[in-house]
Structure formats: C-alpha cells, structure tokens
C-alpha cells in the first residue's frame, strides 16, 4: 500500500512562499510531500530531504531523479549539523509513522499482522521493541505504555508481559498482541493494542526528545519570513509543538547547553488545521492529524 500524504494541499500552500526558494523536508517517508514540492517549485528552486529510515533513503534515490533534489540519511534532531550554514525558505515536518511502516509487517510497527517485534525507524542503530520488552523491569514497561500510549491498563499489561517472558521471550508482534488481548477486550473500532504499540514505538525511537531537539535548531536554518509547517498525529507531539512556539516561552532541551538557547522569533500563521471530512473518508489514518504553521519574524 502506498503512503497517502495528509493535508498535502494545505501544507504546501503555506510552506511554499517562494517558488524559487530552497526547502527542507525533514520527514521524507516515501516522498509524497517532496514530490509535490518539486512539482510546484520553479527550475531554480531546491529541495533537501532527510529521513532516519534507510529504506526511505533508498526509495528517494531510486525514484526521484531531479537535479533540484537531494536526500541524506539522518535524524531531524541532527538538522543543524546536517545542514550547517545553509538557509531555507521553509521546513516541513510530517510526524508519526509512514503508512509503509504500518503495512510492512516485517518492520514490527503494526498489530494487524505478525512480524518481528522491532519498531525501529532506523534499523541501523538503537534497541528494538523486543529488546526493551524482554530486558526492562515491569515498572519501566508500565511507565512507557502509560506515559507515551496513555494506556490506563498499563500495569496489567506490563505484568502480563513479565509473566509471558518467564517461559519464553517476546519475539513477534503477534506475541504482544496476544498479551494485550488477554487483558483488554475490543470495544468499537479501535484495536485494544493501539495504545500499547504507540507507547512502545515512541519510546524505542525516542520520538519526543528528537522532536524537541529539532525544533530548537530550526530558527538558525530559516531565512527571514521562513515558514515551518508541522503535522502531528497525537496529542504528545502536538503539545510539544504548541508549547514550543508560545510567545515569550524559552525552550531548553536537557542536553543543549544554556548558551545555545534559541530565542523565540516566530509568529503563528495557522493555529490549528485538521483534515476535512472528505479527506478523513478517503484516508481514515488522517483523522488524528493536526497541522500548525509558523513563520520566522
């Protein structure tokens, strides 16, 4: 299944303030936004793209043949290092998981089919979901599922995970689904493992801290009146974005030295935009999306 971009027209209408400018897509995925940006840019415009997923980099290299386009493997939390000294007219962050991650069961993101319990966006580094669940304490597992998944049954699920691994290790998404289903019954359209999978995925990929670090670096990469478009898919992401851009609020990630605090120089262009009913009908995965737009004053 191909990745269907969310709020495509709306995001690019805000982002592309100069069709001969230079732009940055920090979440390339399968290139849906990037390809449309290139379609709209003039011959002198440029687009740089980033993704932490090696498969996404390979896809971009094989499928986009345009001298205006370049793509690099990296985490958007490294954006200042990746593009040191460069300036962009606009930056796009389309957060969350790519549809191709969910549909490829070998990546371990989805509870819809059985596959290795991995969940890493960058499979070249870090620990997998299986590593975390098989080696962590009951409290650590419970805290992650509750904090990042907002799962009220996190303690019961964590206890069941510990009981399961007392006889054999968790290896597959099917193992985790069975454990959650032994605790929670399905009610309505939402699968009972949804929140558990979200919480573990966010933890494994350290998604929220990487987002905080990326936001703290964007001011230095933008031209005057440069635009930032951010599409979030759950309240934890959206809260970070909303709070970061609040007037007169300084944001300091724990591992950025105090002398590197970025003074907030942004104004809100679009406070909150959600997909239309028509888009949600076409693409149900878009229903939780929230887009916010800011520009450098």
Image (tube, rainbow, N blue to C red):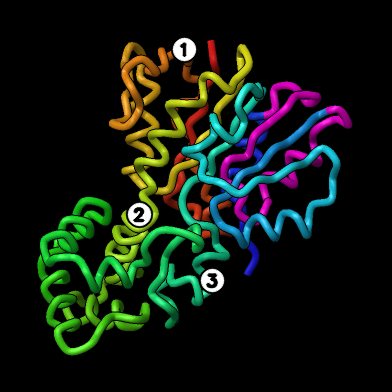
Residue 103 tag number: 3
How far is the residue under mark 2 from the one under mark 3?
18 Å
Secondary structure, mark 2, is helix
The reply to whether the magenta stretch includes residue 19 is: yes
Residue marked by disc 2: 202
Q: Position of residue 168 (x, y in %)?
A: 23, 87
Position of 68 relative to 206 (above/below) = above
The mark nearer the N terminus, 3 or 1, is: 3
Position of 166 relative to 214 (above/below) = below
The reply to whether dot 2 and dot 3 touch (C-beta < 8 Å) is: no
Q: Residue at x 44, y 62 (%)?
A: 120
Q: Residue at x 52, y 65 (%)?
A: 101
Residue marked by disc 1: 265
Q: Which residues are magenta?
A: 16-44
The reply to whether dot 2 and dot 1 touch (C-beta < 8 Å) is: no
| Displayed quadrant of residue 109 | bottom left
Q: Position of residue 128 (x, y in %)?
A: 37, 66
How far is the residue under mark 3 from the one under mark 1?
39 Å
Q: Position of residue 173 (x, y in %)?
A: 37, 78
Q: Position of residue 157 (x, y in %)?
A: 16, 71
Q: Nearer the viewer, mark 2 or mark 3?
A: 2
How far is the residue under mark 2 from the one under mark 1?
29 Å
């Amino acid at each position: 299944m191909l990745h269907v971009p969310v709020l495509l027209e709306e995001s690019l209408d805000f982002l592309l303030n100069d069709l001969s400018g230079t732009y940055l897509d920090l979440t390339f995925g399968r290139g849906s936004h990037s390809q449309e940006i290139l379609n709209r840019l003039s011959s002198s415009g440029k687009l740089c793209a980033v993704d932490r997923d090696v498969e996404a980099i390979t896809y971009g290299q094989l499928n986009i043949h345009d001298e205006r386009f370049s793509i690099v493997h990296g985490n958007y939390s490294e954006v200042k290092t990746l593009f040191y000294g460069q300036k962009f007219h606009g930056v796009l962050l389309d957060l969350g998981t790519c549809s191709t991650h969910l549909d490829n069961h070998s990546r371990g993101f989805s509870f819809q089919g059985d596959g290795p319990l991995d969940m890493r966006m960058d499979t070249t580094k870090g620990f997998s979901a299986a590593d975390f669940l098989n080696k962590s304490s009951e409290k650590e597992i419970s805290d992650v599922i509750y904090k990042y998944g907002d799962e009220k049954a996190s303690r019961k699920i964590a206890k069941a995970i510990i009981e399961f691994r007392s006889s054999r290790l968790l290896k597959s998404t099917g193992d985790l689904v069975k454990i959650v289903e032994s605790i929670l019954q399905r009610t309505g359209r939402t699968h009972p493992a949804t929140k558990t999978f979200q919480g573990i995925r966010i933890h494994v990929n350290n998604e929220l801290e990487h987002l905080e670090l990326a936001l703290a670096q964007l001011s230095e990469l933008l031209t005057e009146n440069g635009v930032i478009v951010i599409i979030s898919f759950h309240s934890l992401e959206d809260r970070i974005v909303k709070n970061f851009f609040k007037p007169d609020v300084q944001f300091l990630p724990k591992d950025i030295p105090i002398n590197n605090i970025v003074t907030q120089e942004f104004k809100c262009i679009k406070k909150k935009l959600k997909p239309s009913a028509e888009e949600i009908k076409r693409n149900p995965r878009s229903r939780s999306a929230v887009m916010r737009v800011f520009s450098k004053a």
